Image (spheres, rainbow, N blue to C red):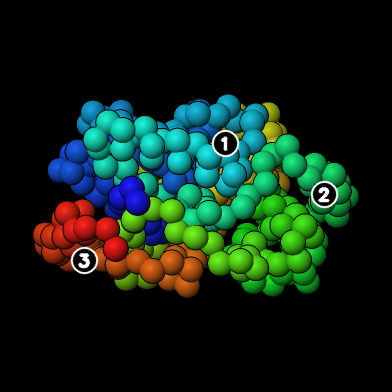
Amino acid sequence: MKKVLVIVGPTAVGKTALSIKLAKKLNGEIISGDSMQVYKGLDIGTAKVTEEERDGIVHHLIDCRDVSETYSAADFQKEGRLAIDSIVKKGKLPIVVGGTGLYVQALLYDFELGSQDESTEIRDKYRQFAEANGNQQLWELLQEKDPQAAESIHFNNQVKVIRALEVFDKTGHSILAPKKAPKQLYDYLLIGLETDRGLLYDRINTRVDLMIEQGLLNEAGLLHQRQTQQSIQGIGYKEFFPYFEGRETLEEAIEQVKQNSRRYAKRQLTWFRNRMNASWWDLVQTPETILELEKEIEDWLYSSEG
């Protein structure tokens, strides 16, 4: 099996910096495993890696969709595997980096995911329900049918809620617990980054303040004008809509971004801890352990399969 290094963890924990360091050391190219970084123009709110930060390292699945387009786990699964094949053919190491758990899992295992063209009738039914009753009631439908999936999906993430409902309606099984155990497709090493919860939340709050300084409001304003279907669901954008509409103060909107970001980080950690077997490291509080981490990666990289 092809070897794939995977770096996961919550927001603001140092995934980007580590991935670039390792890509330079191990002759790698990076595949973004983030559901929002695919969108052109959404740079600040998604903490997208800048050209300067990339330092010459090739990145895949960044800026590959317009904000008006949809992007699904099935799209990522297909395009991510093509990227892995392309990187391996060059004799380089694919390094998948991201915090969207379903995307990472769908890439590494042979989960059967429907394309955007399938089951439009089911999706349209739930979209119409959400339009008539709101995202909260749509999520409550999911909670009734598939409480396991509802626990891991934010009620405002309409795309993922509908996708989970669609899978349940089609298969009778949770999107998180398929009837048939999926097969592992790659010889992968999963590195998880974490740190003290209070410290992580402080880092998230500081990051949001920095994003405001860098122009996050401008990005959110463009999305508010366009009101596109999927890209507005990203944390850091929709929270400003009540401010633009005169229903909240800017301070209230910023605090909502921070709160939602902290909650998302908690869900990310829960997902990876419960769903995938990662080797966990705290490079924030113990940066010196990166030498041990690099040794673990090299031992895996140069070991024979199986």
151 or 25: which is nearer to us?
Answer: 25
Q: Is residue 206 left or right of residue 177?
A: left
The reply to whether discs 2 and 1 touch (Cβ–Cβ < 8 Å) is no
Q: Is residue 247 left or right of residue 292?
A: right
The reply to whether discs 1 and 3 touch (Cβ–Cβ < 8 Å) is no
For label 1, the SS is helix
Q: Is residue 295 left or right of residue 12?
A: left
Give the class, few, some or many, for how many residues have Cα within 10 Å of label 3's Cα (few <14, many ≥20).
few
Give the class, few, some or many, for how many residues have Cα within 10 Å of label 1's Cα (few <14, many ≥20).
many
Instruction: Identify the mark at residue 220; answer none if there is no mark.
Output: 1
Amino acid type assigned to the residue bearing label 1 in the image: Ala
Q: Is residue 164 left or right of residue 49?
A: right
* Alpha-carbon span between mark 2 and mark 1: 30 Å
Q: x, y (%) of residue 71?
A: 60, 38
Instruction: Identify the mark at residue 79; answer none if there is no mark.
Output: none
Residue at (30, 67) in percent of width and height: 279
Instruction: Identify the mark at residue 285; answer none if there is no mark.
Output: 3
> Can residue 232 be seen in the rendering of this structure?
no
For label 2, the SS is helix
